[in-house]
Image (tube, rainbow, N blue to C red):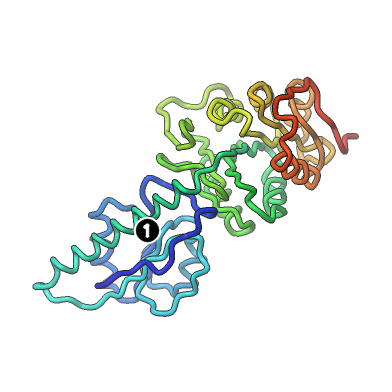
Amino acid sequence: MSCSILALLKPEAVTCTALPRIGIVLADTRQRTALRAVVEACGLNITHCSALTWDSAVRAAGAEVDAWLTDEDEVAVSTKQPLLVCKVEPVGISKSVLWRRSVEQNLKALTHDYQRSCEASRAQNVWLLAASAGGLQAVRTFLEGLGSFHGVAFVYAQHIEAEQANQLVKMITRNTQWRAQMALAGNLLTIGSVTVVPPEQRIALPNGKVRILPSPWPGPYAPSIDGVAAELASEYGAACGMIVFSGMGDDGVLGSRTIREKGGSVLVQSPADCTVPALSEAVLERGAFNQSGNVDQLREAFVKLLVTRSDRGAVPSRGVVCGRE
């Protein structure tokens, strides 16, 4: 089997994990099994392995794969992942060692290039998407309307059951141009990415890299919006921000204050625009914020803040409220 890297992903569209997650698309069962064994022996995680057509495989598992291995000659390079095209041919026992070494060398090169691309696209500005009940549709609408990545990575903390968290990743990937995945140990927060915070695992973000902590989220909320906001404020200071969407409870009030105290920005969906207004009302009444408005107004304010950032040092006690009944 000979392999060559057909296309490396563009730096602005990368989400990095410690090692790339591999997808295999091969029609021959024996070849697929042999390749899978070598990939796993190299310590790489295979998240898709099938005999589907190339297009079908990408549709089925595109959000869960960082690099693809396939034997197809003609492949449309439309994915956000690196693409490693492997020409697989039957080999005799005498050639199996050389075949294996060739695969290992190409996988090593792929991993190196993948991680280098990730590092090159490490985000310097990171914003928190904070939501609870009713917030999912608002977040989707907000991201759908962003025509550019604006040099930003998002971290998405949504109060949701653990088994539903992966659905957030699929929703974002299928309906927006943003690259989404669950927070995994070793992830870098990269431009154009949305890192979904798992409710069952507490995370830290030292130097913009996801670290899984053994302790649970403090308090009654999982994940803790306040906890994630504190991580971002500590790491990014004035280069971070938070957007509060529809939800219940008051998780986010302390986080909004922390971010504003560090010079970051906070935007809040107006209660009149929320499916469930309690969270927005709590932040508006007891937190700190720059501006409140409907989803379209928040998107406009977000882009303007990134472009101007003229009031970076100012921390007003109250912000501008729009669209409130």
Of residues 76 and 181, the one nearer the viewer is 76
Q: Residue at x 15, y 68 (%)?
A: 98
Would residue 173 be found to the left or right of residue 213 on screen?
right
Image quadrant containing the C terminus: top right
Number of disc labels: 1
Q: Residue furthest right?
A: 325
Up/down of 193 relative to 48, above or below: above
x then y, percent, for residue 31: 26, 72
Residue 43: x, y in percent?
27, 51
Relative to 292, 49 lies left or right: left
Q: Is residue 169 above or below residue 247?
A: below
Which residue is at a point 59% across and 37% down the rendered structure image? 157
**Circle 1 Cα neighbour tier, 10 Å, few/some/many (<14 / 14–19 / ≥20):** many
Q: Quadrant of residue 250?
A: top right
> Horizontal and vertical percent for residue 171?
60, 54
Q: Quadrant of the N terminus?
A: bottom left
* Residue indicated by mark 1: 22
Instruction: Tell me which residue sits at (13%, 76%) in the image.
Output: 92
Identity of the residue drawn at 45% across and 73% down:
54
The amino acid sitting under disc 1 is Ile
Left of 131 or right of it: where is 212? left
Residue 117 showing in the rendered view? yes
Q: Is residue 246 visible?
A: no
